[in-house]
Each structure stands twice: as structure tokens, then as C-alpha cells.
Amino acid sequence: MATVHLPSGLTRHTGGVDTIEIDAARIPELFAALCDRFPLIAGHLNDMAVAIDGDIYADPGYQPLRADSEVHLVPRIAGG
Amino acid sequence: MTATREFKFVGTRPIRHDGVDKVTGRASYGADVTWPGTLHGFVLRSPHAHARIVSIDTRAAEATPGVHAVITARDLPETTARIAIGESAIDLRDIADNVMARTKVLYHGHAVAAVAATTLDIARRAAETIAVVYEVLEPVMSVDRAIAADAPILHPAMRTTGAPAADAAGATNVASRIELKRGDVDAGFAAADLVVEREFRTPMVHQGYIEPHACIARCGEDGRASVWCTTQGPFFVRDASAAIAGLDPAHVKVIPSEIGGGFGGKIVVYLEPLALALSRKAQRPVKMVMGRDEVFRATGPTSGSKVRVKLGARRDGTLVAASASLWYEAGAYSGSPAGAGAMCALAAYKIPNFFIEAHDVVVNKPKVAAYRAPGSPIAAFAVESVVDEIARELRIDPIELRLRNANAEGDRAPYGPKYGPIGLTQVLDAARNHPHWRAPLGANQGRGMAVGFWFNAGMNSSATVTLNGDGSAAVVTGNPDIGGTRAAQAIMVAEELGIPVERVRPSVGDTDGSGYTDVTGGSRVCYATGMAVIRAAEDAREQLKARAATIWNVSREAVEWHDGRAVPPEGTEKAKPMTVAELAAEMTHTGGPIVGRASLYAPMAGPAFGAHICDLEVDPETGRSQVVRYTVVQDVGRAVHPSYVEGQMQGGAAQGIGWALNEAYVYSADGVMENAGFLDYRMPVASDLPMIETVIVEVANPLHPYGVRGVGEVPIVPPLAAVANAMRDATGIRFTELPLSPPRVLEAIEAATTVAVQA
């Protein structure tokens, strides 16, 4: 089960839940499960980057997940 | 791999491939190219900071002899296309409106019309005949005014996105708000022995690249177009300019010129869509070059800000709680780096309880663009100033205090994930052990230090490595070279193929001649595009091994590669190791040309820390200060070309020192920038600064084959606080507002003296 950590700004859409365990092999399945459980979060996922086991993807695409992956949704940034 | 690999070329300092062209003036920059039949474009800009456009009458301009085209926003399609820029996809509507105002002007200098004529003088005089009727509105020139209950609203449809404050409702100038939180902040402060809280302000500042924005565009009657321009992102220029001008990007080629500095400010588009639209209308090439005042008034600086920071510590210096409220000016449209500021603010420290909020606030100033570690220097100025105060109050060495709280591998970053290998502790140790830290100070001198953090963007990169018949090679990527990346890429190819660096020709391709590559920015090129180059060279090497196998009539798998040579399996009759040159000479007989290719999408990984030490001498009679010694220590992962790495460290420090001491957009009450030139906008020049000392620390980034981390952005993060902390040491005064210009410093010294006398 991947452990998903949500930033505090998103927990208003999850009833205060900030950590969720989700069984998913890849990011798209994880996002789908997240939206199933918390429909209000759906409109915000495209604005976030995703950290998978410490590596941040601005576009996580179809990145695979390990059974014990740690996933963090983080704000997107731009560099100069 | 990185820990054990012996490098032959990585870490050497070959002469830069572009050096002679640049010092002799042969290098071609944005304004250096003219095509047959070229017209000259001029942009008419708003004289108001905030106004509604009632009407625009261009008839007189169009009738002016020598004028071939006049455009306004009506000549550009309304677009809502989303395209990739840097780390994310963006809505082009704001960028298009920034390129040319449609219904409102939102800052002084906002483009409202453009003219193309046979000479620049004719274009300028024709533009002056364009009659624009404005309904002038009150300009919003600060965060405080923007968030006031009775503030004019810049964008009536704007609602706060992200995590709006509980009382947010209706139209607003706060485009977004984010939060980062951990632990119990109230309990953390309650457990602290010392709490320090301060509010800091920084003005809007510009990147100050020497080369102004410039381009030439040619658009035929069939909609096929070419653009030569100075840019950090030719593919973004292609896609954005085509969408804004209403062209098919498949028909647009963008050729990047040499670039005279960018620092993030040349990622976006300003002139290119206008030149394309003018060229389409005139059916002639159109060249456009900004003056320095236009660069200041109408391109993207970085945010002015208000930041409130509160830190709590135990007597032993352990930081136990933090809160920070960041308010960043976005300029006329949303998009300040407030979020990045929030992520970076506490990145150095293990603090169990914190709350950070960051606001993106629109004001009637130019739309901000990226500027070297966008958002991080502002946050570091506030946090590192407060950390310095805590060290002083607790009488703990500032480096020791930071070491006691330093994040290390396995610690959780304030934005969530655990850090991989990071070099903060090593950087702080190197700073503490540097002779500078213990050197005696002279009269009126003070010493300050600060740390800084920035990420290492990944994203899309492509590279090709082409072998020539004589065994030399060419490497092409789509990243304009703003920091020595061509030299680094040549070193990488040399390392992988085992040929001299001088036998590798690195170049920047245009959008037809290179695979898609994201912008030069985010400290990503040596890291991400470097990985593509290494893989492309590996691909070429594998092909060379296959050619050797053909010649020796052995299996490909049996061929080894050692020290730049293909080595036959033992016992192969009459076979001896072959060099790249020997194999390249046989290309035609063994299968044709050899082209190594690679493309990839890299994650953002391997963030880096730096620590700066600044000695400042302050003249108490005038308030003028002089940096007398400055040392930059930085974890770079692996220095591929150390001279360029040191140059980045020095250059970032110099820019940060300018931000700290002198630079500021100065506005009149009606929103007009009053210092839009280098005479009045004071940037440091070589004679202002001592030779900046550098210490390279190498803690390998495990995601890069050589261990490379991004280098270019970290060094602008610490100087604001390092200089302010040195000023505190020299004068006894804690400054919370930049710049530390002589008038501000003198006023504070005199005020402190008056207080002391009265006491």
C-alpha cells in the first residue's frame, strides 16, 4: 500500500484527512482511487507536483509505485 | 558508480568553446541579425499603471509613409491554450494579454499597439500618432494596498485558489494561497525559551541581464514563419508565440541566438508574437529590440514582498517552532513564486512544529518572471535574519547553531518528502573550517553568514551525438547556453567516448534541428540535459562497439570498451583494440553514419544547499557599505567544469549582493517606475566587489551518472541575509527592509545615535 501525504491546503477537501494508504501500482490508479474517496480533491490534483519516494515529478505521468512507496503532493515550482 | 568512478575529463577546465567568439564580438545575439527587407518594430506602451482602454485609433499611424503594419490586440486571437513552460502547463490567456493589452492596461509600460516601418524612427513617430483613450483607474502598488478592503480589483473574475483564507469571499487581488504545516505550532512556541518575530520587506528587483530582449521574425503568406531571438526556451517561444499570434506551431521555427544573460527572465515571450503578427501583416521580416527602459518597465522582474517570520528555540539553540506568512507581489497577473518561497523557507532546518502560508498577490506592476531560485532569496532573507538573531541572543556561533538544526539525509523536507543525500552539514562544516570565518575584522566591519536552498528541476531533454569520419564528435541539444552548459556537455561526451574535449563540438540547435527540450532554467541543464547527453554518447559508444564486432567478425556482446577503445575478445585473430577515430574511419564500410540519440523526462531531484560568509565595511558618516570579503560554499554534487561552477557561484553571489545593497524598483505615487535605467537602478559592477572566494563541496546526487546537482540558482539565495547579518554585526542595527542603501543605513545609524544620546 502506498502512503499518500496531502498538504494542509488540500485537507479541507478530505475532511481533515492528511495521510491515506492506497493500493495502486501506478500514479493514475492512485489518483483515481484518491478521487473516488475524496471527490472534492479532483479539481486540485492537476495543480500539484508529485513526490514519489523523494523524487519530485512536475508531471508524474504513469510513474510506477512500490508497495511501500511514499507519495507527497507538493506545490509546483518554476526555476530561473 | 559515482563514488568509485575515476574520471578523465570530468572535473577539468578546458577552454570554453564559445569564448573567442564572445570576447571578439563575433558571437551573434538577439539584435545582431538582419534579414533582407527587414522592417523595424516599435511598441506603443501605456502611460498609466491601471486604466481601462476605451478606444484605439490607428488610422493616422497606418497612413504614415514608411509604415507597413500596425497591430493592436484585435489582430491577435483570444487564446485559452495551455502549453508547457518550465515545471507546469500554463494558461496562455494572461501571457497573451501581457504581450498586448486587450481591455485594460495593468502597469505603466503595458503594450497597447505596435508599428512596423522601414526605419525605427518612422515606427516610433507613427506610434505617437495612435490615439488611445483611457479611463484611468487607481493603481494598486503594494501588497498592503492590494489586500485592503477597499482596494481596486485588477481582475474582477479573480478568486483565491488553493487554500483560501477562511474569510476569503468574492473578487480579490489574492490570486492564490498555500499552506504547509507540521506538528503543533502553539505547543512548540510554548516550549521555546526564546521566540523572535520580525517582519521583512523587499522591493521588486530585476534580473538585470545585459542583453535586452530582441528578435527578428519572418512570416510568409502561407503562415510559415521563422524567429531568431534571445531566449532561454526556443520551444516555448515557438509554442507560445504561435498560439498568441494565431499560427500553427508546426509551421514556426525558432532559432535561439547567443544569450546575454537571462536568469529566468528570458523564459517568457514579449516581442516574438508581436513581430510575427506584424510580419504576417507586412509580409516582410520585422525586427524588434527593447530599450533598457522597456526591459525594466515591461518585462518580468521578481516580486516585491512582505514576509513575517517567527522562530522559537530552546536555550541550546534547538529550533522547536516556526511560523511564516509570505506575501509576494505577482505583478499584473497571477504567478509569483510565493509557493516556492514557502517550500524553501525552512528547508535547511529540522523543526518539528511549523506553519507556513504563502500568498500570490496581483498589483499594478509588470508581471513577474522567474529570477534565479524564484522565491527562495526573499524567504531566506527573513528566516536567516531571524536565525542570526537567535544565535546572537543565545550566544551560539551562527554556524554551530545551524549545524545543530541542519537537515540531513532521511530527514523530512518541510514540503513533505524525505531528503536523499544532501550536503548541508558538509557545506556548514566547510564554511566553519574556512579561514574566512576566523579572520580578524577591521574597524567598522561586520561579518554575517546565511544558508540557502534550491531545487534541481528535471523535465524533458533530448540530445544527439554525431560522430564524424575523423573521430571527432558533435553534440546538439535544444538548451540555450547561459551557464557554460556547452562546455560541460562536451566534457560529458569526451568522458563517455574517450576522445579529447577539444574534439567535441557542442552546439545549441533550433526547434527543427534538436529534439524537444524544455527551457534552460531550474538549474536543470547540466543535470537533466546532461543525462540525455551522457545517454546519447553511450548510444554512440554502443554503436561503435557493434562496428568493431563487425570488423572483427565477433559477437557484439563480446566487445569490451576500455579507455576510449573497443577491445576484442581474447584470442581474436589479428584483432587489436580500435580507437574512436579508427572505428569512425570505417563507418561507411560498417553500416553508415553513427548518431547517438537520447531523450528523457527527469524528476526534480538532488536539491542543493549553499552557505555564504560576508564581511561588510560601513562608513558611519555616509551609510555607504562595501563588501570587503565574501566566500561562497556550495554542494554542487559533481563539478563537471569547475571554472564554470565557480563562475555560477560568484555570479549568483554578486546578484544577491546587489539585491541586498542597492537594487529596487522606485515608483511614483501614480505607478510610474522612476529609475528605469542602469544609471539610476544601481547594480554591482566588477569594481564594486572583491574577488569572491569559492569552495566546492561534492555530495553526489544519486540520480545523475556523475552525481551532478544544479548549480546556478542556489548562490543567489543566501546573500540577502548574509549581507544584512553582516550589517547587523557592523552597526548593531537589524535591518528588515531592503535595499541597505546608504540613505537607509545612514538614517538608521543617525536614529540609533540619537536614541543613544537621549538615553
Image: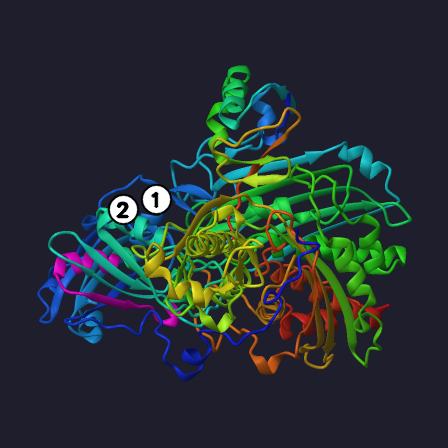
Quadrant location of the C terminus of chain B in the rendered image: bottom right
- Residue B536, position in %: x, y? 46, 53
Within 10 Å of the Cα at label 1, are there few (<14), some (14-19), or many (20+) other Cα atoms?
many
To the question of a shared chain for discs 2 and 1, the answer is yes
Pinpoint the chain carrying mark 2.
Answer: B
According to the picture, the residue beneath numbered tag 1 turns out to be: B92
| Relative depth, front residue between B32 and B459 | B459
| Relative depth, front residue between A59 and A7 | A59
In-image side of B55 versus B659 (left or right): left
According to the picture, the residue beneath numbered tag 2 turns out to be: B243
Q: Residue type at mark 2: give it.
A: Ala
Within 10 Å of the Cα at label 2, are there few (<14), some (14-19), or many (20+) other Cα atoms?
many
Mark sitting earlier along the chain (2/1): 1
Task: Give the residue drawn at x 55%, y 74%.
Answer: B14
Segment colored magenta: B274-293
| Relative depth, front residue between B110 and B460 | B460
Marks 2 and 1 in Cβ contact (< 8 Å): yes
In-image side of B114 versus B424 (left or right): left
- Residue B551 is covered by the magenta coloring: no
Task: Give the residue drawn at x 43%, y 70%.
Answer: B260
What SS does tag 2 mark?
helix
What SS does tag 1 mark?
helix
Outermost residue, top direction?
A37
Task: Give the residue drawn at x 47%, y 54%.
Answer: B545
Q: Residue type at mark 1: give it.
A: Leu
Residue B574 lies, with reference to residue B189, above or below; the image says below
The number of numbered badges drawn on the structure is: 2
- Residue B277 is covered by the magenta coloring: yes
Residue B144 has which mark?
none
